[in-house]
Amino acid sequence: MKQIYTLLLLVFASVASYAQEVDSLKLEIQRIENSLQYQTGVISLKDGLATITVPKGFKFLDGEQAEYVLTDLWGNPKTGTSLGMLVPEQYGVLDSNSWVFNVEFDEIGYVKDDDANEIDYADLLNTMQEETLEENAARKAEGYEPIQLIGWASTPYYDADQKILHWAKEIKFGEADEHTLNYNVRVLGRKGVLVLNAIAGMNNLPEVQQSIATVTGNVAFESGHSYFDFDPKVDEVAAWTIGGLVAGKMLAKVGFFALLLKFWKVIALAVVAAGSAVMKFLKRRKEATPAEEVPVS
């Protein structure tokens, strides 16, 4: 019976050690969240290019903090292009169920929308899936997980009156069980497009879809920068078309797991050490002589 108690103590010790490390992880997540400076109200983007009025139910991180979240916390390649990030007010950026709209401006010129009604999005999807697979070798070489484009989570839609394009991709990163949602919004302007990418899990799709109208209704180019201010005499026309905008980069939200990497060795060592002690105990039990065995009553 004493030996059984010893075994139980070893198991409890391993569980306690693991629980302590999990608590440390929770404290680190809370520390990171507390360090972020969220904003509300009217936000000026890129020196007066556009404004975003933070919608009810959201909070805003500026470009520097958004880059920190995207690269240091979520493990995406560093670009330095984020103008900021809209975060649902009920979530922190490292919450398991969180999602965000990342805001950028792509200065590609004036995008003609003549092709908007002529695009076969099924064919475009097939092409994008093939290209994604071909690019995986380069991603692996740079230390990033391969990507599989599963399909449309929301078929591309273009609002010709508002000059707003949006669509959604369902993506699988590496061997992840949960697929990633990239919900893409493009607001066409005079010299390029405002980019609003919702980076989320597939389980967030209903929330994201419900917020599209609210978010796009609170983003606007300043006077002189809108699509309708285009001057063919001085402004450049983009090489991109509506169809070309749909085939873009993909981002991942892997925040909890990226942060977990900082602690995994400590947690693993604690579990392995305890497990090793348990195995040694069981081995001793197996090699014990019959006289040392505890009789079964």
Image (cartoon, rainbow, N blue to C red):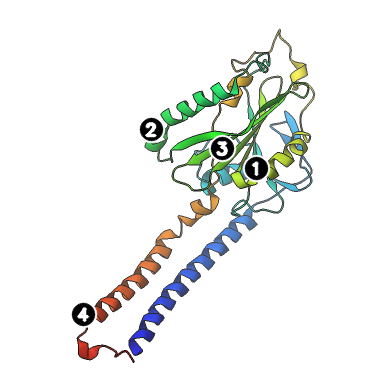
Residue 86 visible in the snapshot: no
- Mark identifier at residue 232: none
Sequence-wise, the earlier of marks 4 and 1 is 1
Q: Secondary structure at mark 1?
A: helix
Q: Secondary structure at mark 3?
A: strand
In this picture, is 88 found above or below 16?
above
Position of residue 282 measured from the top left corner of the image (x, y, whole percent): 29, 77
Q: How many marks?
A: 4
Residue 65 visible in the snapshot: yes
In this picture, is 197 found above or below 277?
above
Q: Which residue is mark 4?
A: 287
In this picture, is 1 found above or below 277?
below
Q: From the image, which quarter does the N terminus lie in?
A: bottom left
Q: Residues within 10 Å of mark 4 (few under 14, many from 20)?
A: few
Three-letter amino acid code at disc 3? Glu
Position of residue 30 measured from the top left corner of the image (x, y, whole percent): 60, 60
Q: Is residue 155 left or right of residue 264?
A: right
Three-letter amino acid code at disc 4? Glu
Picture quarter containing residue 248?
Answer: top right
Residue at the top extreme?
233
Q: Which residue is mark 2?
A: 137
Q: Is residue 8 left or right of residue 23?
A: left
Q: Which residue is mark 3?
A: 170
Q: Secondary structure at mark 2?
A: helix
In this picture, is 293 found above or below 17?
below
Q: Which residue is mark 1?
A: 205
Q: Residues within 10 Å of mark 3 (few under 14, many from 20)?
A: many
Residue at the front extreme?
297
Residue drawn at (51%, 25%), measured in percent from left and top? 126
